[in-house]
Amino acid sequence: MRWNMMVLASCLAMTGCMGSSMSERQDQDVQSSLQYDNVPCDQLLAQRNGLAQQYHLSTDAKPSFSNPAMGFGPFTPDMRSKSKRDTDLASGKIDAMNRSIERRDCGKPNKQKKFALPS
């Protein structure tokens, strides 16, 4: 019994070191929104909508994370299918695009600036 536990522990440790653990790959799905700040608003909205349509996601998709039991996240191998990994990556990109859109007020009508003399 003790031997089996040692083998299991070493296998889990090696799985976590291979770079293919569930938590590590899910962390890669989270994207920075700064990379989209140089993209014009209309083009960014079109990219986001196209990506959402391609992967059958809503335009306000966010990356999801699994909750492995008892802190085994770094040691749990990523057993998601390729299509699920691609969909999760797309939801991370959509979330980053949405944060850039929100920060820059894309898609909202321009506010009229009123010029007035101070009273």
Image (tube, grey):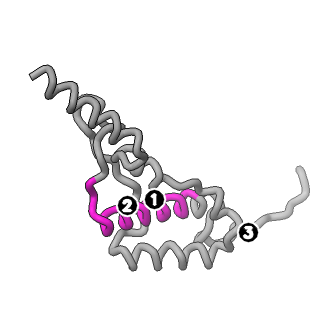
Q: Dots 1 and 2: beta carbons under 8 Å?
A: yes
How many other residues sit within 10 Å of disc 3, few (<14), some (14-19) or many (≥20)? few
- Residue with the most extreme top position: 2
- Residue with the most extreme front position: 3
Rendered residue at 52%/62% (across/down): 98
Report the residue marked by disc 3: 112
Rendered residue at 39%/55% (across/down): 63
Report the residue marked by disc 2: 88
Question: Front-most of 80 and 66?
Answer: 80
Q: Quadrant of the N terminus?
A: top left
Q: Position of residue 83 (x, y in %)?
A: 31, 69
Q: Dots 1 and 3: beta carbons under 8 Å?
A: no
Q: Any magenta on residue 80?
A: yes
Q: In this view, does 109 lie above or below 97?
A: below
Q: Is residue 107 above or below residue 16?
A: below
SS type, badge 2: helix
Q: Which amino acid does label 2 sit on?
A: Asp
Q: Image quarter for residue 114?
A: bottom right
Q: What residue type is labelled 1?
A: Gly
Q: Any magenta on residue 21?
A: no
Using the numbered discs, state the Cα–Cα distance from disc 2 to disc 3 in whole angstroms. 39 Å
Q: What residue type is labelled 3?
A: Gln
Q: Image quarter for residue 59?
A: bottom left
In-image side of 65 versus 45 (left or right): left
Report the residue marked by disc 1: 92
How many other residues sit within 10 Å of disc 2, few (<14), some (14-19) or many (≥20)? many
Question: Front-most of 104 and 20?
Answer: 20
First along the sequence among labels 2 and 3: 2
What segment carries the magenta color?
79-99
Using the numbered discs, state the Cα–Cα distance from disc 1 to disc 3 in whole angstroms. 34 Å
Q: In this view, does 102 lie above or below 23?
A: below
Q: Position of residue 93 (x, y in %)?
A: 49, 63
